[in-house]
Image (spheres, rainbow, N blue to C red):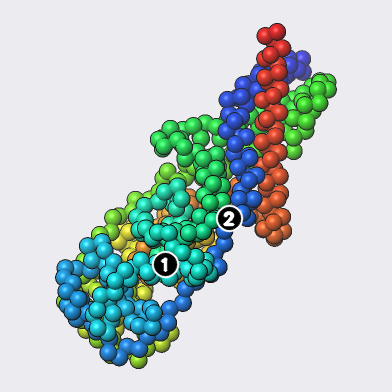
């Protein structure tokens, strides 16, 4: 018993020293994360909201439509297309062709070129999504990479950035290939997003390895200091030692008891999330389509009196149009119009194998029309097809037939990490209380963690000053 008490007596001062020293090393990082976590619900509510989130195309009569090959020939367009789309706009059927990286718009009945079709359609979509038909347009710019304004979380590329001449600096990012909204950004969102990404994600450190190493060190240190704080409190309580009555110390200790476990779950789930992203599966590079125009001779009038849209797709080096007609999705051969049975299933399997070659049978194929579970809002794309494979990782590959894009890859390790991040970091386990209540509670704990570290650093600085005096 005496030996145990002696060990405890020696352990407490050591824990106190290292608790303070580690706190001084990682304190600023933890305070920054706490304050940015506190600000996140506020930032999300300050951001601009779109007026609409869906764009609906009008049906178009298929009579008198030129085949793609004939329309391109009349317009004098040669070479191969990497994308072809049929849709109605401004009361007339149009082709959107992508040739050598340039989007070209043609009248689908005459083959006449539509000047500035791509830019004008981008403006049309941007006005629709923010409900602004009056403000002047300052500029329209093609964006082919993510940047500080249009970040990776938005997923869609390339997009058009439509800048409105408004006091709030509104810019709208739209995808003309699919009529989708990328995001809307105004000056407030740009400032708050820059703050959050620098303070929470440390994007100011451009070297990825350095950023990962420093963030990992601070996250591990933050969790460790919280655990040592709890341990030293327990040991002092067991030893029956008296507590100093310094008001700041009492507040620091009280906050520590209240939020230490939360600090551990925040830092642990953040560290897990950070490292899980470093071990993504290998994704094959899928070459773009290169369809010769003479292979695109489908007679539209043979399909249906009215069409909604059609997109060119590639399945095993053969070309088909993915056609919406009479509320039904059909896959039609691009040259002769022959119907491909179970076209979307065949297409989804071909896409999945192209991106993630898997030597395993798939268990099921699912159509996903809403975000939820392992396929969350962060993935952006809907609807998608999920293919579940019978392998050791229980791999699920999500593809978007509409664009031919890989939407997500989910393995068992991703599911565990996603659950950890959702429950321990984002606090979705209290979603039943409502978004406002959940955000308020998690923000309160984030603020408590920041204040706990601030007080700890103040106490340490005071102690060092007393020693130097």
Tell me the number on the disc at residue 123: 1
Q: Is residue 48 above or below residue 203?
A: below
Residue 221 position within the rendered picture, expressed as x and y whole percent measured from the top left: 58, 30
Which residue is at the front of the view, 163 or 344?
163
Q: Give the left or right position of residue 455, taking residue 309 as reference.
A: right
* Residue at the image position 51 percent from the left and 55 percent from the top: 169
Of the image marks 1 and 2, the number of the one nearer the N terminus? 2
Element at label 2: loop
Please give the residue where the numbered disc 2 appears in the rendered image.
47
Q: Residue furthest top?
A: 469
Residue 321 position within the rendered picture, expressed as x and y whole percent measured from the top left: 30, 77
Residue 92 position within the rendered picture, expressed as x and y whole percent measured from the top left: 35, 83
Q: Tell me where residue 403 sits by quadrant.
A: bottom left
Judged by depth in the image, the label closer to the viewer, 1 or 2, is: 1
Count residues near mark 1 (Cα–Cα under 10 Å), then give few for <14, some for 14-19, many for 20+: many
Position of the C terminus, as image quadrant, is top right
Residue 240 in sight in this render: no
Which residue is at the front of the view, 113 or 22?
113
Which residue is at the front of the view, 31 or 355?
31
Residue 395 position within the rendered picture, expressed as x and y whole percent measured from the top left: 42, 58
Q: Is residue 340 above or below residue 447?
A: below
Distance from label 1 to label 2 (Cα)?
21 Å
* Residue at the image position 75 percent from the left and 27 percent from the top: 233
């Amino acid at each position: 018993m005496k030996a145990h008490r002696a060990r405890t007596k020696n352990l407490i001062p050591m824990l106190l020293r290292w608790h303070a020293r580690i706190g001084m090393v990682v304190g600023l990082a933890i305070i920054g994360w706490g304050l940015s976590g506190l600000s996140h619900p506020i930032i999300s509510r300050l951001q601009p909201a779109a007026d609409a989130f869906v764009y609906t195309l009008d049906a178009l009569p298929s009579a008198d439509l030129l085949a793609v090959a004939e329309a391109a020939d009349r317009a004098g367009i040669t070479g191969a297309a990497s994308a072809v789309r049929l849709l109605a706009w401004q009361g007339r059927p149009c082709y959107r062709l992508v040739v050598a990286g340039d989007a070209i718009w043609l009248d689908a009945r005459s083959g006449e070129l539509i000047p500035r079709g791509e830019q004008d359609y981008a403006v049309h979509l941007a006005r629709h999504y923010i409900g602004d038909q009056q403000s002047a347009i300052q500029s329209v710019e093609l964006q082919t990479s993510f940047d500080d304004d249009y970040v990776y979380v938005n997923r869609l590329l390339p997009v058009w950035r439509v800048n409105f001449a408004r006091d709030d600096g509104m810019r709208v990012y739209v995808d003309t290939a699919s009529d989708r909204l990328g995001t809307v950004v105004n000056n407030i969102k740009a400032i708050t997003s820059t703050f959050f990404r620098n303070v929470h994600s440390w994007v100011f450190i451009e070297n990825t390895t350095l950023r990962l190493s420093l963030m990992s060190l601070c996250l591990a240190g933050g969790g460790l200091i919280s655990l040592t704080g709890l341990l030293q409190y327990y040991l002092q309580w067991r030893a029956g030692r008296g507590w100093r009555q310094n008001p700041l110390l009492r507040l620091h200790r009280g906050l520590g008891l209240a939020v230490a476990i939360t600090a551990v779950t925040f830092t642990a789930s953040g560290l897990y999330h950070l490292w899980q992203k470093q071990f993504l599966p290998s994704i094959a590079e899928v070459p773009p389509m290169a369809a010769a125009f003479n292979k695109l001779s489908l007679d539209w009038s043979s399909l249906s009196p009215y069409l909604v849209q059609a997109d060119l797709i590639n399945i095993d080096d053969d070309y088909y149009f993915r056609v919406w007609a009479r509320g039904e999705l059909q896959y039609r051969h691009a040259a002769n119009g022959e119907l491909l049975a179970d076209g979307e299933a065949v297409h989804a399997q071909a896409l999945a194998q192209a991106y993630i070659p898997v030597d395993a049978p798939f268990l099921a194929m699912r159509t996903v029309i809403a975000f939820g579970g392992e396929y969350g809002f962060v993935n952006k794309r809907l609807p998608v097809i999920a293919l579940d494979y019978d392998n050791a990782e229980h791999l699920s590959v999500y593809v978007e037939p509409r664009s031919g894009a890989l939407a997500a890859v989910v393995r068992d390790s991703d599911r565990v990490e996603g659950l950890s991040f959702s429950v321990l970091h984002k606090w979705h386990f209290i979603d039943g209380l409502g978004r406002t209540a959940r955000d308020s509670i998690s923000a309160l704990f984030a603020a408590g963690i920041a204040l706990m570290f601030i007080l700890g650093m103040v106490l340490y600085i005071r102690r060092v000053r007393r020693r130097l005096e």
